[in-house]
Amino acid sequence: CEDFELVKKKLEEARMEYVTASVEDGRIKIDQIFFHDPDGYIIEICNCVKLPVLPLSACPSFSATTDKQR
């Protein structure tokens, strides 16, 4: 999401309750908005594009094999 203020404005116009949060890791700050959809599911919108993209091989718990290959 690039415009959090617009998202908050739209949620307020729709009279939807929401909460915001921020998470910082080093120099990266991620902003988040949480709200419930009409079915009760929690929706998260964030500016996660700020997170660096890592290859899956950099994740220690990732395995390229499937259950059928094991």
Image (cartoon, rainbow, N blue to C red):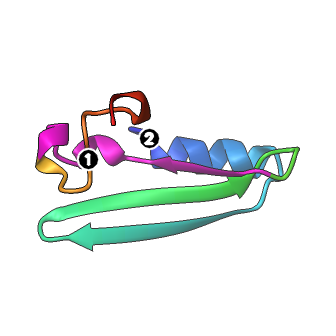
Q: Quick check: marks 2 and 1 in contact, CB under 8 Å?
A: no
Upstream in the sequence, badge 2 or badge 1? 2
User: Whole-Å distance between the Cαs marked 2 and 1?
Assistant: 33 Å
Observer-nearest of 5 and 44? 44
Q: Secondary structure at mark 1?
A: loop
In percent of width and height, residue 19 lies at 62, 67
Q: Amino acid at mark 2?
A: Asp
Furthest-top residue in view? 68
Residue at the spot 62% in from the left edge and 58% down from the top edge:
34
Which residue is under mark 1? 62
Furthest-front residue in view? 70
Residue at the spot 77% in from the left edge and 45% down from the top edge:
13
Furthest-right residue in view? 39
Q: Is 28 within the magenta?
A: no
Q: Is residue 54 visible?
A: no
**Which of label 2 and label 1 is nearer to you?**
1
Q: In the rendered view, does 5 fall on the left or right side of 26? A: right
In percent of width and height, residue 7 lies at 58, 43
Can you tell which mark lies on residue 3? 2
Span highlighted in magenta in the image: 41-57
In percent of width and height, residue 43 lies at 65, 49
